[in-house]
Image (spheres, rainbow, N blue to C red):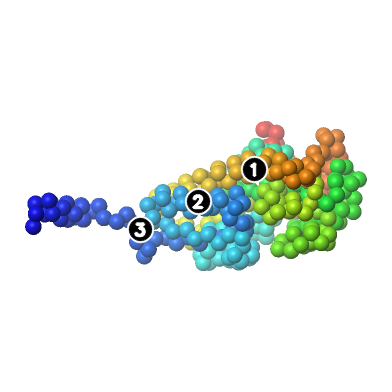
Amino acid sequence: MKRTQRLGIILVALVMVMGFGPIPGSNAADQIAIKLAHPNVPQHPMGEGYELFKKDLEERSGGAFKVDIYDSSKYGNFDAVVQGLQMNMLQMGSDATNNLSVFNPQLMFLDMPFIVPSYEASDLITDGPIGQRLAKSLEKNGILPLGYIEIGFRQIFSSRPIRTLEDAQGLKIRATHSKAHIAILKALGMNPTPVAWGEVYTALQQKTVDAIDIDLNLAWFNKFPEITKYVTLTRSFYSPHLVMISKKLFDSLSADQKKWVQESFAVMQEFERNKIRNNEAMILEKIKEMGGEVIELSPAERLRWVDATAKVAPMFAKEVPPELIEEMKKTVAGK
């Protein structure tokens, strides 16, 4: 045997003896599997954010984690996601805070109209004491919150121009099943009509409904501007999602593993929020290029919409008490 061959064999043996073998956790049998479910399409900023989370966590942990993503509600509806998290059949998921209000009614807090004026304000609420306190309330249900990401502010996509409150009267508009959402639309004089999410495009196309209020990104990635000529920037309320992890899984992790998950989520959260917000100007320009019209309410007209919906929050005082509304307003004002 040649000298160089002998040296090579000796070096390999030394590496194995000294422990420089395969990266711990890189074997499939040793990996911690995370099934992660979310409701959006892969090209939506949320979908891109979760792909980044997967890549970051798998790399950060040296292969100790393996993340499988179930996008577009492929895992199931809200009930399936929550039950999956509670039983650790699903390890991570996200959903709208108003859906999670079945566990704590106060999680309807951001469904109240015209309280959150900007993304800066939404960050103060969700990342501050209010958002953290309400998220933490889910722990007793076997769900641990990692933090908030977002869908964005609601705008009206319609087949006719909505420039004033008078234009909104009688508008047949797709509504979710949220009681607060329906109450807001009725207070504005519209005719809220329940339509299943998978049927919205066809309903708009066939004029079953004349409009939908939805955030810019979700509208764009579901191609609603193709069939609605007008978008009115109402910003009636802000829609966040809460990212959750199974308590059973999280409690089983080591301190380092918990840190990796939290750090990878922080990377994803920053990316997703920035992408949602930076996309909006692009989307509005694209709508104009397609021949659509972007309508911005004047300050005086916007105040009329605020006044028209002032009765909504008192209707939900049991779920979202006045002191919570006041705390939100003070937070937004920086007090």
Q: Earlier in the sequence, mark 2 or mark 3?
A: 3
Three-letter code, disc 1: Asn
> Could you say where residue 128 lies in the image, as x and y percent from the top left?
60, 41
- Residue 317 vs 119, above or below: the answer is below
Q: In which quadrant of the rendered image does the N terminus lie?
A: bottom left
Q: Residue at x 88, y 42 (%)?
A: 164
| Label 1: element kind | helix
| Precedes in sequence: disc 3 or disc 1 | 3
Q: Secondary structure at mark 3?
A: loop
Query: Label 1 neighbourhood size at 10 Å, few (<14), some (14-19), many (20+)?
Result: some
Camera-side mark, 3 or 1 = 1
The tally of labels here is 3
Give the residue at x 76% y 62%. Answer: 202
Labelled disc at residue 279: 1
Residue type of the residue flagged with mark 3: Ser
Q: Is residue 321 visible?
A: no
Q: Secondary structure at mark 2?
A: helix
The residue indicated by pointer 2 is: 53
Residue type at numbered disc 2: Phe
235 in relation to 140, above or below: above
**In the image: residue 170, left or right of residue 157:** right
Rendering coords of residue 85 (x, y %): 55, 62
Per the image, the residue denoted by label 3 is 26
2 or 1: mark nearer the eye = 1
Quadrant where the C terminus lies? top right
Relative to 171, 335 lies left or right: left
